[in-house]
Image (spheres, helix red, strand yellow):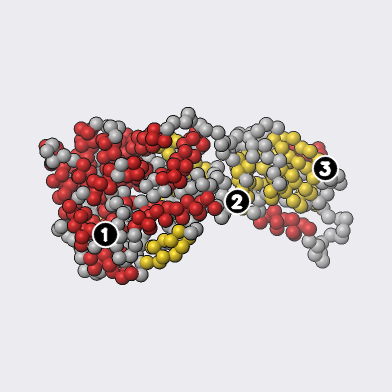
Amino acid sequence: MNVKAVSFGLIFFVMTMASCKKDDPAPGSETSFTLTSIQSDDRPVGSTISGASLTPEIVASFSAPIDRTTVPTAIVLVSPTENLTLTYTFSHGDSTVTIKPSTALEYLSKYNFQISTALTSVDKKALGGNFDSKVITTFDPADKFPVISDEELLTLTQKQTFKYFWDMAEPTSGMALERKGSGPTVTSGGSGFGIMAIVVGMDRNFITRTEGVERLNKIVTFLETADRFHGAWSHWINGTTGKVIPFSTKDNGGDLVETSFLMQGLLTSRQYLQPTDTVGNNLIRRMTKLYEGVEWDWYRKDGQEVLYWHWSPNYNWDMNFALSGYFEEQITYILAAASPTHGIPKSVYTNGYGRNGAIKTGQKYYGYTLPLGTPSPLFWVQYSYLGMDPHFKDDYADYWEQNVNATLINHAYCAANPKNYVGYSDACWGLTASDNPTGYDAHSPSNDQGVITPTAALSSFPYAPEESMKALKFFYYTLGDKLWGPYGFYDAFDLSDGWVANSYLAIDQGPIVVMIENYRTGLLWNLFMSAPEVQAAKTKLEFN
């Protein structure tokens, strides 16, 4: 059980009611009495009781003996539909009452525990103020599904998650919906991840090769006529019309990072197609043309030694986001360097991405050295490496070491659980960008809000296979009744808050399919790395 928030109101209430000022009534003439302490299962109670047992024992102590007849109406435990039946046991001369539910509560459910001013003392004084606490019960530790082999579980996870991109695709364009229920809004980067998932679907016979090629053709046909801004697509696109949907007011033009995620998928699928097949050969040529149409060099903003994320036909460079330093954008620089038509020199990579060496940090966390940056959301070590095999080094880092250690740090942080969130463990881990109970955020060890996102651990299989398998089994067997849905695992959950998302996001589902496959066969890594443009970029950037 985790006390997520200490009740300042209770502390203030107890202190003020217990204090004595010059104008306070004389001793013995007070008109009210106070709640002096309250515990649940031997732990202090605040505004929230997280991870509560199904039969919590709540002990409340007061500054005076209480009138037993007022207890049933004044001390209640409320479910969303009813007041629950409670048992009350009195002690310490009736100044302490122990409260228990008569029947067990439900797992991972929310209740409200209330003590109202209807409670009176034996000498008819009223309680000095109301007390309220939210009770959130723990999760059910029992398995929810029959146990299957690890290989079967991996295949099931890939196949179920793949359905997001196959069954849920926007019908006109074939592109990936930004999230389930997003109407015509499709995501360029998430569609790149989805294209790679389609390759996995064909290779694992989730769909036929003919079906997969037909879907790729639909996507390419859409992209050929969709809005482009110096060759780059926008972050969000209307899947019906091909017109830009602004991500924000000034972000209504080209998005170079999202475009690079999309192109990573297109180039990977291009390498999977058969040149001897008429449709496949046609798609190969058209995908290459789309890639060569991206003006990577133009996004240097007047020839600077750095790439810029956004450009708008209305606001030009007002977003002013230079792709400088270490985050998720390395693939953008690699594809820019790889372009045979609009390539950038190594100096842009060195000055922009590498910051002339200032990108290096080399700090140690939980016993693991991190060559670049600080402990981050895990998508930083996943998005750029869905196709780009991270077994390489540049002037700044060994990227296999970087990605493995970043993952193990994330895992070690969750296992240590310094904020005492419910559920965090060796098997329940993974902080990255996702939905949360109040919206959306990039969760990380430095921004830990109690939210675990399945894609974080499941897209880490190549880096931490044992830790990822433990997480997969916990998500599926232990939390599967709440977390497993028609398109795989829901986006995120917070056991301290009793919250499980009902959402699916393309950018979270795609990496699960892709990175599990890279762990199992290396398929996407092998395909992307076989592209001659990528090999040329490795030479230009002096990767080894």
Please determine whether, in this image, residue 345 is positioned above or below residue 522.
below
Locate the C terminus by quadrant: bottom left
Read off the residue under disc 1. Answer: 544
Query: Which element type, helix, strand or loop, lies under badge 1?
Result: loop
The location of residue 147, given as percent across then percent down, is: 47, 31
Q: Residues within 10 Å of mark 2 (few under 14, many from 20)?
A: many
Per the model, the C-alpha gap separating discs 1 and 3 is: 74 Å
| Residue closest to the eye, 224 or 267 | 267
Read off the residue under disc 2. Answer: 4
| Residue closest to the eye, 276 or 312 | 276
Q: Residues within 10 Å of mark 1 (few under 14, many from 20)?
A: few
Specify whether 269 is left or right of 371. Answer: left
Q: Taking the image as drawn, is residue 479 in sight?
A: yes
Read off the residue under disc 3. Answer: 91
Of tags 1 and 3, which is closer to the observer? Answer: 1
What amino acid does circle 1 point to?
Asn
Please determine whether, in this image, residue 92 is positioned above or below residue 329.
above
Q: Which mark is residue 507?
A: none
The location of residue 473, given as percent across then percent down, is: 47, 38
What amino acid does circle 3 point to?
Ser
Specify whether 207 is left or right of 105. Answer: left
Query: Which element type, helix, strand or loop, lies under badge 3?
Result: strand
